[in-house]
Each structure stands twice: as C-alpha cells, then as structure tokens.
Image (cartoon, coloured by chain):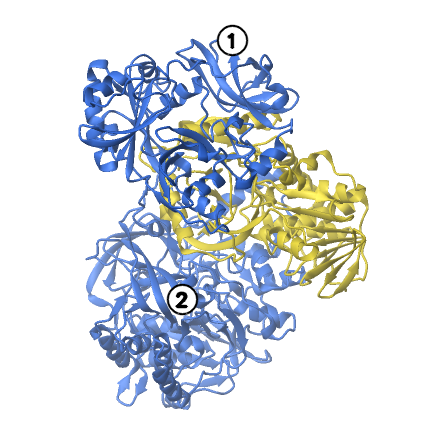
Chain colours: A blue, B yellow
Amino acid sequence: MTTRFNNLPTLKVDAGEKVPFTYKGKKFYGAKGDTIATALYANGIRIYARSLKYHRPRGFYSMDGECSNTMMEVDGVPNVRTETTYLKPNMVIKEQNVKGSADKDMMGFMDKMDWAMPAGFYYDVMHKPAKIWPIAQKQIRKAAGIGALSPDYIMPGKYDEIYPNCEICVIGGGPAGMTAALAAAESGKRVILMEVRPWLGGNFEYRSAKYADGMSYNERAVQLAKEVEACENIRVFLSTANVGVYNNNLVTGFQIGEEKDVFTERYVEIRANSVVVATGCIERPLLFDNNERPGVMQAGTALRMATTYGLLPGKRAVFSIGHDLGLEAAVTLFDLGMKIEMLADIREDGQDPELEKAIQARGITLLKGWVAATANGRKQVQSVTMTTVDGTVSRDIECDLLVASAGFTPLTGPLVVNQAKLKYDSHTNFFLPTDIPERMYAAGRLLGYEDGASIEASGRVAGYEAIGDAAKADAAKKALSELPGPARGCKLINAPVKGRKSFICFDEDTTIKNVKQSIDKGFDVPELIKRFSGAGLGPGQFGIPGHNLPLYTAKYQAQPEVKIRPTTVRPPLVPTNLATYAGTNHNMFKITPIDDLQKKDGGIFRNIGVWQRARYFSNDLTCKAEIENVRENVGMLDGSTLGKFRIHGPDAEKALQRVYISDMSKCKDGRVKYTAMCNDDGCVIDDGVVIKNGENDYYFTTSTGRAGQTVEWIRYHTRYDGWDFSIVNLTDSMGVINLSGPNARKVLEKVTDTDVSNEGFGFSEYKEFSIGGIPVRAMRLGFVGELSYEFHVPSSYMKSLWLMLWEAGKEFNIMNFGVEAQNVLRMEKCHIILGQETEQRTNLLDAGLGFLWARKLSEWKKVGAVALRQAEGDESRLTLVGFKMENKHRAPRDGALIVDDKVRGYIATARDSFALGEAVGMALVEKHMSKVGTRLSIFEDECNGNLIYGKVVPMPFYDPEGKRMKM
Amino acid sequence: MFLKKKPMWGEKKKLKSSYDVVLIGGGLHSLATAYYLAKDHGITDVAIIEKNYIGYGGAGRNTAIVRANQRTQYNVPLYNEALKLWPVLTKDLDYNLMFNNCGNLNLMHSEAAMKAARMTIATAQFHGVESHLIDAKEAKELVPALNISEDITFPIHGAMFHPPGGVVRHDAVVWGLAKGAAKLGVEIHQQTEATGINTQNGRITGVVTDKGTISCKQCLVSAGGYSAALINGFLGIKLPISVLTIQAMVTQPIKPLLDHVVSSGAYHCYANQTLKGEIATGAHMDQWPNYTTLNTAHYIKHQAEALSEFLPALRGLRFMRIWGGLADMTPDMAPIMDGNDQYEGFFMDCGWGYFGFKSCSAVGKHMAAFMATNECPEILKPFNLKRYQEHKLMGETAALVNYTPDN
C-alpha cells in the first residue's frame, strides 16, 4: 500500500485505521474514510474496468460518478460506482464485463475494430441474410450490459423513506449552499440543506490554497460548516444525493446510511416552499486522443485524491488544463512532492496573477496555448504528445499522470428537470439556466463565479430571495456586484487531432469521429446524435458528454453555440437503486370490519379493487359446499365493500333523477328500489338499491368498484343546475352482512323480537330494527335467489352482529360463503354483475335492464337516456343471453368466444350448476343470435378448432318464478 | 459500405409551393404512410411536415414493444399484419430494425384476469395468432426472476404468453422509414411547423406552415399526441380524445436477465430488457389529462415498488433515466382512422394512445392505400370516427375508461 500523507488539514481518511476488503479474491486494506476507488488506487490498481464496446482499459478519471470507468460489483450489487461509494469492512469487490481481467482483457482487440463500427453501424449490418440476425442478436445481448444479476438475487440492506417539509430547501452544501442556508435561516424559517458528500464544504473543502489573508479555503469551509451546524433551524442531510425536482418544488433524493443508521439507503422526498440550487460545477473533459487512458485524470480528481485521501496520484505529471483550479492543483501537488513535467494551459491569457507568481516561484514552466493531443501508452499513460492549440508544434513528454481538463461545466440538473431552460453564455462558456421556475434560485459556482467571496455572496443573495426578504436581497446583490463577477471560461473543446480515439462519451465509447459521422448522416442536433451514436445514454448519462456534445455539434456545423441546445437532462440526476426508490414498499388495501373473523374462518382472500375480500372458504374452488349450504340451509357473506351513501337536502331527489335511469320519485317508504346508472353512451356503470329515509333524504348503495367515484360523478352531472344537496360517503363507516338461505328467517327470529315473517317483512322491503341492541338497517333482497336479508350496520357493531347471527345459526349449520359462491348463486338466477356480464360496450338495454329505464322522463336529462334512444334499434350490438350446453356437463370456460366465420360474442360467466345439475351460463352475443333456441358455437382457447355448442334459453335458470326469494 | 456520408433522409430542401400529398407530423405513422404511398402507389410528390425532428414524439419515446394479442377481432388482424412486417421492412429498407422476437408474457393476478386473458387468447387463436394461457409455474420457467410466491400484493395466478411478440428498435424504425421514403422521393421537412389547413367548398386545398403555404389535394394529420389539438385548431373538428402524459424509464445496463417482455395490469407495470442490457419499464399514464410530458416523483417510485414485488432481483439495479411522452386516448382505447368524411382530401390517423408504435407499419400501408385510391380498406373501416356518434365503442378494453375531470 502506498504511503499516505497524514498531516494535511483537508484529509478525510485515517491512514492509521485499516479497513480490510477483498478484491478479485485477494485481501487488501484501505484506510478508514476511503472510497472503494481510492482504496484500490492506494493498492496500486490503475485499470478498474474495460469499456463497453471497445474494451478499452479504463481508470480513475472522475470523482463524482460522471462515468462508468470505476463501476464494479460490490457485495454482489452490480454497477456500483466505486468512486462515490465508501469502503466498508470486508467488502467483496469484483470486476465486470471482462474476459480475463480488466488488466488483461481478451476482448481488448475490439479497440482495433473501430473502423468497422462507425456511429449507428449496427443498423446497417447483421440483417442480410435474415437468418443471421437471431444468432447475431444473442451475441449482442451477451456483449452488452456491464454488471450481472442472477434471477434469484436478493438485494441486501434495509430501505426506508422520509417525507420532510421545509420552507427552504438548499441543494448543495458547498460555500454558496451554506451561505444561502445561513441567510435563509436568519428568518427563523425551517431550512433543509442536502449534500451528496458525507461532509459540508464543496469545492472549498479540499483546497489548501489561500482564501483570504490568514485563511485557507479549507479553513473557511470548516468555519462555515460550524456556523451551519450551530444553526438550529437548518436540518442537514449529508450523504444525500438530489435526484429530482418536480412541480411546486417537490425535491427528491436518497441518503446513504451510516453505521449508526437503521437504513442502508433511504428515499427522501422534501416539500419545500423555495429551492436554492447551489450544486457547483463538474469538469468539462478535454477531448484528445486516448483522453480516457488510465493515468488521465481530471484536475479536481488529482487534487482531491491528494488532499482528501492523502494519495499522490502520480510521480511525474503533465498538466493540460484550461482553468485556474488546474493551476492551483499543480501548485498544491507540486508542494506535496509531485514532479511536474509540463504545465500547459489552453488559455493564452486570463490566468490569476497570484497563481502565476506561485508557479514561477516553484520553477514550473507554464506554457500557454498548449494542449494534450495524444496520451501514449498501451494500458496506462507513459507519455503525452503535447501540441500548441493551433497544432503546428508538438512534443512528447514522459509521465505517469496526465491531468486534463478543458474547463468547468455547471451542474444545472436540478433546475433543468424542473423546467428551467439553458442558454449558451459566451463569457463563461457555460449553458446557463434561464426561465428558472418560481421560487427556485441558483447560486454559486454554477453561475460561473470562481472567486471565493463572490461564491459566498451569490449564495447569500439566493438565500434572502428564497425567504422573500427583498431588502436584504438587494443589499446582498449590491455586495455581490462589488466583487469579481463570473470568470471567463475556456472555449476549447478538442485538441487539434482527427478524433478517431477522442472520446466524447466514455460509457458508450463514442468518439469525436462518431459525432461527425452522425452529423454527416443527417443527425444534426444533439438529441438525435445522442440516439444515433449513444453519446450520453450510458450509466454516467450527461456527466461526460453533457456540454461537449452541443459545443462540438455547433463547431462541426459552423454554427454559433447559442443555436444549439444540450440534450435534455432527466431524473434521476444520480442513478438510484430500485430498492431505494421502493423504500418500505407498503401496500394500501382496505380491509372490512370483520377481516380477522373471515381470515380465522379460513377465507382465501383476493384483492378486489381497493379491498381485500374472502373469495373462497375452502380449497375447492368450485365452492360446492358453500353454494349448497346457501341453497339448502343458510350462509353468511361479508358484503362490507359495497358502496354506501346518504344523499340529502332540498334537491336530493333531483340529483338522483339525473344520474339514475329509473323514476326516482317512485321510491316508497319502507321499500327497496333496485336501479342503475348509465354514462353518456348509455353504458351501465353502476347498479344498486335506493332507500327513501324521508323527503329528499335517501340511502343508496353502489357496486364496490364505483364507490370511489360516485360523489364526483353526481356532482359532475349536476354541476350546472345549482341544486342544493349533500352526499355523504358511508362506505367505510357501515358494514354489510348478507344472510341468505331457506333458514335465514329462522336464524333472524332467534336474535330479534321484530316481526320478520313474510307478512311483517316482505320481499323488497326495508326495515330498521334492533338486533341485540344493535341498530340495523335491514333489506330483503334476492341477489342469490334465496330468502335473503342484508343488514347494514355501523362498522363498529359489525363484529358483534356477525357473532350473534353466527351463534344463532349454529343449529342450522350456518356457514360462510365467499365472493365466488355468490357469483355462481347469482349467475344461476341470471342476476348480473357489472364488469362480468357487461363491459365497456354494453348499454342498459344490452344488459337486459331496459325495464329500469323511465324513458318518458326526458325533463330530467337522465345521463345516458339520449344514447339509449339512439342505440335502441341497432341490431349489431352485443346483448346478454342465457344458455345451456348441448353436452350437459361441460360448461365452457369464461371468456370463450361465440363464433361463426367471425367473432359474434363471448361467454360472460358459465358454470356446471350444482343446483340445476347441468352447465348453464350467460353470454354477450350479437342481437340476431339472442333469440331463444339459437345454437351457439363456442370457441375456447386451445380448442384447436373443435367447437362446443350451446343453446340460448330463457333466463333465469333457477327458480324462474322467484318463489324462493319471496318465501 | 460503412462510409456512406450522405444524409440518410436526403439533403435539406426548400419547401415547394405545391405537393400532391402533405403529411403533418414526422412520426412513425406519417413516415410509414409516406413510404407506402411512394412504394406501393408511386405517389412520390409528398411532403412530411415536422415541427421538431423526426421521431421527436411518441416514436422516439415508446418502449418499443410489439405484439398482436389485442382484445377484439378488429385489432388483432391489424397488429398481426404489423408484426409480420418487421422482417419484411428490415429487408426492404435494408436497415436493421432489430426485431427481437422474444415473446410477451402478460401476468394475471386474479380469476377475473384469467377469464379476460382467455377471451383475448381465444380471439388470437381464432385469428391464427399464437397465444397461450400458462400457469404461474410455467411463467417462472420462462422468466426465472419472477416472484410467484403468495405473499406479494398481487400474487401471480398465471400469464398470457404470446410468442410472436417482442421488441423492435424504435429509433431504427423512424430512421429506416425516413431513409426508405426519402429514397423514393418523399421530402422530409424538419423544423417546419404546420399552422393551418386551407379548405374550399368542403375540400382540402392546402397546408399553411411557418415556411410558407403549400397547396395540396390531400392532407393527413398523424401527429401523435398533438393530432387532436391540431385537427380541432385547423378544422374545428372535435375528437373524443384526451391527451395524457405517460412515463417510462430505464435502468443501467446489465447482462441478460429478462428474456421476455413481462407485463402486469394489476401492478401497472411492464419490463423488458433492451439489446443494450437496460431494463426498460413503464406502464400507466398520469391520472389527469395534460400535455406536459413532465416526469413526476411518484411515478418512478411506483415502478420501483411494483418491480420490487414481481421481479425482486431488479432491486439491485439502478434507474438511470426517466422520460415522458403523450398518449392520446379515445374512450375505447382504439384509434381513429378516417378520411374523405368531413372534408374531401382530409385524412386522420390518431387516437393511438400508447399503441401507435406496434401498429405503424401496417397502418401506413393501409392509410397509403386509402389515400391513393380514396377507398377505405376493409381493415380500417371499423376505426371510423362515426362509431362514437353511434355510441358503439369498440370494446378494445373491457373496462370503462374515462379521462375527463369527472372520473
């Protein structure tokens, strides 16, 4: 292991504390505080991976996850960016996508094949003859992809989620973010500060250069961080990456847990009044040949490796940079013992005079207007061909490190994903944000400020703006205007080379040459070049090509940069685990008031819309026992999911007249009225019963699935009438018990003194009485075709009532019945269930419910009435029929088709009926086939053309006179 | 062969003042129609007018799934024809559309869903399209990453397996059709915005653009999510279309894990692995009409939650990118293809919702025939606009759908 510096104030590693890990099966040690990538670097690892297409060697280039160079498999998790992931004891680290090793990859020859793989080449090959494509495709699939996952992989760790609120959310904990947070916090409002690194300080933190007299940047960062930490109304989220900003300043991110935390990672969703974006800059890669060869490194990366992690990244370095931070890095690294073979600045002028003096004082030659043209060395940099920017003079220089950077590029992602625009600015050479949404503010280095005081001042401006303090904001603006403005940016994109091996996107192996090829083929805007050449589609997304691509596109087409837009930046701004997004993975079903009883009784549950309900009560999915017990004895069903409403107020009846298809003025006291609602196409959307409680006061039920929409439906369809009524959704506050079977009355008589004889409480009647002190609303209905009572009771009484009835029913062998048994029972009776015997095409008449339609009441403008009238004579509609099978004991499967030379309909529900001893069912068929006696040819899935046959019969099948439900 | 430097869809040309046919929209349906107008009917004096660049809309934003396992007899033959055209187009266009015939697996999570699947499968089989109902175990054999345990929100009962379906490289279809059309003489005008349609005495006379007015006898509006607004704005024809944003996303690329397209209605989620190794996933639309194409925070989270349950291995992957597009939804989730009705020479091909990609090839062929002969091909007839006036929804979806504010 390389020796480390151990006395720098900027250090974040403790070289004294060793952390063991396994890399490629061997044991290594890193230092406490290392990222995986720095630990590997300390152990002499230089080649971290191979590139996707050409299998070129890749090394430590960036430090903020801009590219996939350092992606590895860590503890079985693929594609971990080791440059941003901190080392934990005993991690197991493996290489990905290599045949052999990253160092010796047998696929390395691919690098020589680039001539055969121009941009978009795959579209021109492998399809002639057509036979080869499936074979080629298999090879492509194998070659593509970086990491691997096994199908039974279980993601380790605990994942959580948190939804804090605040007035001001500051994204970025660098100097501007901290001053913004502090300024905003002066108001006493709640501030959240998100920082992706495990510490505050941003670009000040790792710099030992002079910030002001007697103070280094690092010391200033520490000072600001202390102020932030001391401020009670600033909540700091460290190790928290911002991944998205959405409408109305909804900010999302994820936090990586520390050892003490209960989560491995957690999803963070912040609702903020205002957002300050102070995300700073990343470096804009310099384009030259082999610009991604291991040993080539960004200036910030080289600097941070030394100052934060205590590692000297190389012994003999060449610098090819285009900004003052590059010069500063050279000075700092020189002072730490690095030999600087050449320091080349792309810029002819504009360097900080103090830095120039420092360089001079150290005897380093600064060459202006020079740039790296080619990095030489097969696997690692061994020398660099340097050239003048005009390309007329060049020179080879030996080195083991090439620090290369064209300039900065602002991290505008949080602004852009929330709809800010980008516009090219010729001074900074940045695409700067414009049209920033309301209550969003940008600050700091991303606006081009490089001077420390200016960065902080711009943060203060944003902080005051974010709290809406105009006076303070104006004063801060004035202060800012007296400080140095945004720095001039370096214009150069690529060295004067042809660019066959100049990579504009590392992850997708896209070269300058590929971009030219794309443009020549007509793909002339960055968005199309991205799609055609792949630039920016890889795991690092825009990180490497983000701003070079539009700049180069403009250059190659001889257009001014202002005409070119960068490709769209999309969330997540940092790639995020599905496990993290999923968080605690809760489901949100509703359960009925007697859910536990139903479970205890062996109910097999199913999700029905938003509810969970018992569908079966045994493993016999034909439900024979449940069905027969209802037919012969008595059964109980938990019907609590039914929609239940009260509508009242002076115009309540009018509202019902509008939405129900029947004449609602005919609701009588003490009676149950069955009716239906249609939509504007006349299609049945709901059915249920209505009970009149008093003048303009009704209680009504809807099907389970419609309960959620009913209030809005009624409001919507009466929106222009100014009617005065109120609707209350009682669905969750009332439970429903259905007691059905020939012995139902006997059970009921045992628990109530009320006269429930057929004379006292007849079919289709409604009665309120008490059962053991519990007030019940009772209805006599006949959905399953037997003597049947439906009790509606407040949810809190459900359990008591259920148990009382159960106890009373024991001597009659009372049993549960579930949704499937009910389905068969009502089918035998030809009572329809919406969605089962109807679908989106089925109107009221098609479903055989025409008798409900009060067709003369046109004054109510009943919803659907116009459509019903218009569709009345249409013979081509599907209409509901009952049928029996020619082979009595062979019910067709639900969903089977009715066919001749065409599809003429389908089976809605069909079963081998236990009560009838034969197969019966209902089907939707074209009207001309609906006459009783028509033979139906039935085409089932997997029938191989062997049809089965049925015959249309009158409905209902069971107890056609309805004696049993009226007994 | 590799160094062809010519622009694939022709040198940029100046807009002429007159064309036989103008197609508004530079998406797949328009490009396919143009291609077949030229190829099958020799009509080459055709201009495609595109406001941005070709494939800007749904053509470039869909998740590239193709299949022919629709619900009704009107749709299955159309999509089946489209399915069979991918290899043909690859050959004819001499452009590899990368049809990955991996088959689609549609998960079913309830008895009711199994019944619905049976009807769809029977419809497919009746039309000679391969599709089968399989149980959960068989599904797991096809997709080993599937979680078929009982303890998830929507346990898997079985699946509809449709081997002829798969995935096509959607961008390649855009570029290939553009290349093919341009080669036959069609002009593609990008960065050109249509701003009006001129009519006289019930006939189309021209199209107004920001680069000048073009006279023409026939005009097709096939502009994806923007069609309904354009048709209403240009001609005052109101279509029963609601436009909603629909989102999709991809993970970082990994080695082969999913060999089929897997989808689930209950989870509102589908996933497939692209040739590049990314898992592409998406499904449902925003819950209210909007033209924004904006991403929402809850959507990507929902996808992660859903995939966590039925494909739990994917928890170890990272989402890399999410994007949005527009779905123009009709009340029956079937498109509107019509012509020579409201105006002589006016054609429309819209309301495709999120199914426009899989149908484009066949529809282009038939729309071209419609425009060339002024006779509506049988296969397109059921998709006329009139069906809504007659309250005859097509039944492409079983459930009632409603995207207006009253839902």
Residue at screen point 58% across, 64% down: A526
Can you give x and y, in whole percent of width and height, for residue A910 in the image? 47, 19
Q: Is residue B26 among what the camera can see?
A: no
Residue A887 is labelled as 1
Along the viewing direction, whichever of B314 and A681 lies nearer the viewer: A681
Residue holding disc 2: A62
- Identity of the amino acid at label 1? Asn
> Residue B116 vs residue B58: left or right?
left
Residue A417 is labelled as none
Displayed quadrant of residue A475? bottom left
Along the viewing direction, whichever of A777 and A28 lies nearer the viewer: A777
The residue carrying pointer 2 sits among few (fewer than 14), some (14 to 19) or many (20 or more) residues within 10 Å by Cα, namely: many
Can you give x and y, in whole percent of width and height, for residue B376 in the image? 75, 38
Which chain does the numbered disc 1 sit on? A
Along the viewing direction, whichever of A553 and A46 lies nearer the viewer: A553
Describe the element under mark 2 as helix, strand or loop.
Answer: loop
Residue lying furthest front in this view?
A695
Foreground mark, 1 or 2?
A: 1
- The numbered mark, 1 or 2, whose residue comes first in the sequence reads 2
Can you give x and y, in whole percent of width and height, for residue A418 in the image? 45, 64
- Identity of the amino acid at label 2? Ser
